[in-house]
Amino acid sequence: MGTSSTSAVAFSADERAAMKEHARELKAGARRNPRNAKVDGERDVLAKIAEMEGSDRVLGEKIHAIVTANAPELTAKLWYGMPAYARDGKVVVHFQCAAKFKSRYATLGFSDPAQLDDGTVWPVAFALTSLTAEDEARIGELVKKAAS
């Protein structure tokens, strides 16, 4: 027979907080009028970005501007307490500030519906410390592709 382990895999306090935040987001979304989803989501995302500090806020504002300019058809929403942008209710792209999990960099991620497929291996997440004009253009192109 196998041996049993007394150690269990546990979620960190930050991970548990993110899960609780996601549960609150789902409950709030269920209570909202679907016709107002785009406006409500935009308001929630902008409020979340406004709560961020320093470079996280700057990056969050830039990512929001890039996404809304390049893929206005995506709907802004909160996803595990992070700004996210969805197509047909499914998250396509999301921004995780560095402070979220005490990381040294923010993360821009693309979910499976983004279909950024490029051969057999392609990136779906990017570490962000700041953004140049070239970075912003590259992200804009990725967002356009992800939204299509």
Image (cartoon, rainbow, N blue to C red):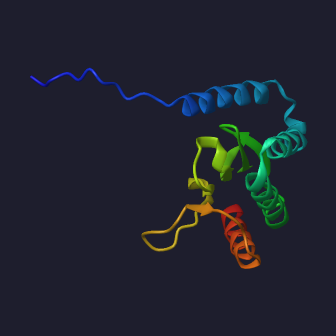
Residue at 52% across / 66% down in the picture?
123
Between 58 and 32, the one lying in front of the other is 58
Kindly indicate the quadrant of the structure image that contains residue 80: top right
Residue at 76% across / 60% down in the picture?
63
Left/right of residue 97 with respect to residue 50 in the rendered view: left
Tag count? 0
Q: Where is residue 19 in the image (x, y as percent from the top left)?
A: 60, 30
Q: Residue furthest bottom?
A: 134
Q: Quadrant of the N terminus?
A: top left
Q: Quadrant of the C terminus?
A: bottom right
Left/right of residue 16 with respect to residue 34 in the rendered view: left
Q: Which residue lies furthest to the left in this view?
A: 1
Kindly indicate the quadrant of the structure image that contains residue 64: bottom right
Between 87 and 126, the one lying in front of the other is 126
Between 112 and 128, the one lying in front of the other is 128
Q: Where is residue 39 in the image (x, y as percent from the top left)?
A: 90, 43
Residue at 56% across / 54% down in the picture?
112
Left/right of residue 94 with respect to residue 45 in the rendered view: left
Kindly indicate the quadrant of the structure image that contains residue 52: top right
The vertical placement of 82 against 128, above or below, is above
Q: Where is residue 57 in the image (x, y as percent from the top left)?
A: 79, 52
Q: Position of residue 124 (x, y in %)?
A: 55, 61
The vertical placement of 118 against 23, above or below, is below
Can the viewer see residue 22 in this picture?
yes
